[in-house]
Amino acid sequence: MIKLNTHNSRCRVAPELVEVSEHLVKLEEKDQGFYKVIDDPVDHILDFAKSVKDKYDHIAVLGIGGSALGTICLKQALGHLYKPSKLHVLDNIDPALIAELDDVIDYRKTLFIVISKSGGTPETVSQYFYYRKKCDDKGLAAKNHFVFITGRKGLLRETSEKEGIKTFDIPENVGGRFSVLTSVGLLPAALIGIDIEALLEGARKMRESFLNKDFEKNLPARLAAIQYMHSFTEKRNINVIMPYSERLIRFADWYRQLLAESIGKKKDVGLTPVKALGVTDQHSQTQLYMDGPNDKLFIFIKVENLGPNLEIPVLDESVNYLKGVTFDKLMHTEMEGTIQALKHNERSSVTITVPEVNEKTLGELFMLFEGATAFLGEFYKINAFDQPGVELSKKLTKELLTKR
Ligand code: PA5
């Protein structure tokens, strides 16, 4: 079970925040699908994954933002940390990234999954055209090498209808950054053998908490209230998300987008997410966190079972304090030391503890942070589900290119 603990929090939760049922009614009125879509059947995804199991040596996801970050997170959290993966996620248009894919793939054995809710994001469309032309030039049928995951309208939808390219739907009421538990994250995950049913089971478990009207039992509401109060009463508008787990570092990237795009809406409203990794960043960021401006709330993620019980062999008596210590014990102790030191320096933090990183707990984590973000939107009285700033930069890029 996921637990949440606060450290050195003097902030009192404002009474209006604990009225969970009122916030849930308002959310329901917004008709958002992120907590409903996890009930949808996934047989079509599993059947497709099974049907192509031995067909492709490489899978290249073309997408950006919410169309890529969930998949990158899933791959890092549940894949091997060293073995090369057959899944490549191209979430940039740097020509080096585009060109060097050629060095590892054989086009005849590659499936490109083009993901775009709008179906027209310039980065994704450019990538699609580039690899599509390569396939066309090699005489490879698009139908055998491309799959689309897209919304109801747009270029990808039109192409799929014209050319019969296999297409998975993104529900209209699920926004890009909330879409990891739709085909956007589930299809690439299933293709690399991740148990997507367990992922959804975990998400459904956390949804029970998200829909619980008792504030104390509602983990997403409690997390959001802590974030909101620290920003509202103490001007701590920076949220450092710091998992003590190599597997969860890309979770921090996923959350960075979710928090930034959902809550950064008005001139004086926004939480700036910063990602950090325990213990690595203790040797890079902690000095600032301890002694620099007290403008941050720290969100630690502790993983109880980090993996194999590896004891550190002590080869010199000058470091006898390590005797009988395992790597996970060292990691947990360093985390505890950091929390205590922050507390000593009047800094606030919250720890989210997960038993281990697996499909179920990851599903729970996704739903915990999505739910908390939705509650934050209600607390700030903003629309957490649109992204006018992103749309504006997309529009201006298109205009600039048109005017050339
Ligand atoms: O959350 C969002 O809506 C955005 O960040 C999108 O995920 C991102 O801009 C990509 O858009 P699309 O999936 O339409 O290509």
Image: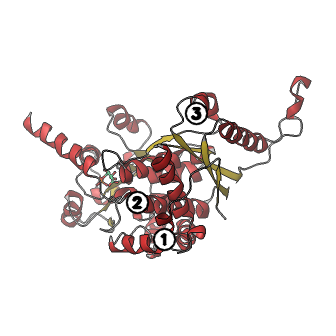
- Out of 46 and 91, give the one closest to the viewer: 91
Q: Residues within 10 Å of mark 2 (few under 14, many from 20)?
A: many
| Residue at figure coordinates x 18%, y 64% from the top left | 162
Q: Amino acid at mark 2?
A: Phe
Q: Residues within 10 Å of mark 3 (few under 14, many from 20)?
A: many
Q: Position of residue 17 (x, y in %)?
A: 48, 64
Residue tagged 3: 289
Q: Between residue 36 and residue 266, name the one nearer to us.
A: 266
Name the image quarter holding the C terminus. Answer: top left
Q: Residue 20, labelled with which disc?
A: 1
Rendered image: mark on residue 178 = 2
User: 288 or 73, which is in the foreground?
Assistant: 288
Front label number (2 vs 1) = 1
Q: How far apart, in angstroms, are the residues tagged by discs 2 and 3?
A: 30 Å
Q: N-terminal of the two: label 3 or label 1?
A: 1
Residue at disc 2, CB closer than 8 Å to ligand 1: yes
Q: Residues within 10 Å of mark 1 (few under 14, many from 20)?
A: many
Q: CA distance from mark 3 to mark 1?
A: 32 Å
Q: Residue furthest left?
A: 403
Residue at image point 18% right, 46% down = 395
In the rendered image, which quarter contains the N terminus? bottom right
Q: Mark 3 against mark 1, which lies toward the viewer?
A: 1
Is residue 183 toward the left or the right of residue 120 in the image?
A: right
- The three-letter code of the residue at mark 1 reads Val
